[in-house]
Image: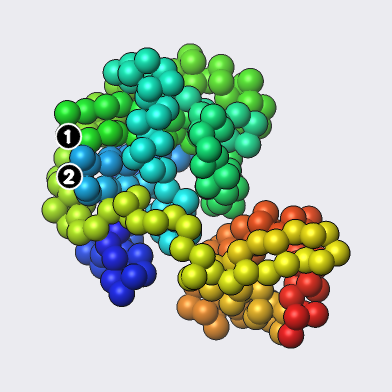
Amino acid sequence: MFCVDQKKIVFSKKLENIYRDNDIQPLCAPLFSRVKGINSFEYTCCYKEGGGIAISTCSEYIKNVCEEGLYILTDDLEKINQMHGFQKRLYGFFCKEIAITDSLESKDIYRLNIALGETFGIEKSFFIIKKEKDHIALVSIGTNQVKGIQDFMNLCSENLQIFNSFIDYFKDVGREIINVFKSEMIVPSYKLECKQENKKLRFHNFKTGNSFYLTPREYQCLESMALGKSVKETSHLLNLSPRTVEAYINRAKLKTGFNGRSQLVSFFMNLK
């Protein structure tokens, strides 16, 4: 669940407590034990009146998705639906090998989302999109244990009915948590403008001719490491978890085109 405070996306403390108390993971334990290899679950709803909720077994991933503006847009969900003839329920894959969003003009946003998911151990996801009366429900079931894309596709195909029945189960047993999220909706992040370049820092690598934007957080992490600090020291300095610092660095690598962290840090050391 997210809201806007002084133009910054932040999380409700009440909802952070739900994540911290680990109420979501036990609800998903039956799915994870029934389908070997599946280890992440996300339940997202985009409401027509302008609200949105996102419940996930990986709250750090959701926080970073919201902060970076890499969430799926309702307009894009409608476009995907139209491409498939307005089916009641759609299925698709969301990973670096194949993504249901690759047919969209805004596919770069979702490619960054996929890279972010890999940072948090969600390498491949299976999407289930269902259009309800007052909202679009988007369910993501993911793994970092099934390596081959064909193996993952087969796994999802074999367990499609189990996935669908678990979603109904989750909506039933998790109704109280879902209602808490809905009651705290203030401003949906997916209604915000994704490309707010005035809030980002623009760079240009004249050796490669590559121009790119970094968020303030990405730049702070790189700046700290260019000063010789480790990931652990950077996380302490910026009040972030080491895993989140790693996520910012990996996203910066993706944006800049540098293959290694040393190349990336070296580039920013020369800017000091």
Q: Quadrant of the N terminus?
A: bottom left
The residue under the point 26% across, 48% down is 52
Residue identified by numbered label 2? 49
Q: CA distance from mark 2 to mark 1?
A: 8 Å
Tell me, for residue 147, which label it has, or none.
none
Q: Residue at x 67, y 27 (%)?
A: 148
Determine crowd level at label 1: few under 14, some 14-19, many 20+ residues with C-alpha closer than 10 A: few
Q: Which residue shows up at 53% across the image and 69% down it?
A: 200
- From the viewer's side, name the closer residue of 268 and 247: 268
The reply to whether dot 2 and dot 1 touch (C-beta < 8 Å) is yes
What residue did someone put label 1 on? 134
Image location (x, y in percent) of residue 145: 59, 35
Residue 249, located in which quarter of the rendered image?
A: bottom right
Quarter holding residue 206: bottom right
Above or below, comparing residue 140 to residue 221 in the picture: above
In the figure, 209 relative to 174: above or below?
A: below
Q: Nearer the viewer, residue 220 or 124?
A: 220
Q: Amino acid at mark 1?
A: Asp
Q: Is residue 12 left or right of residue 183?
A: right
State left or right for residue 225 relative to residue 213: right
Q: Which of the two labelled residues, at mark 2 and mark 1, occupies the earlier sequence position?
A: 2
Residue 93 place in picture, x, y as percent: 52, 28
The answer to whether 102 is drawn above or below residue 54 in the figure is above
- Rendered-image quadrant of the C terminus: bottom right
Mark 2 Cα-neighbour bin, 10 Å: few <14, some 14–19, many ≥20 = few
Label 1 secondary element: loop
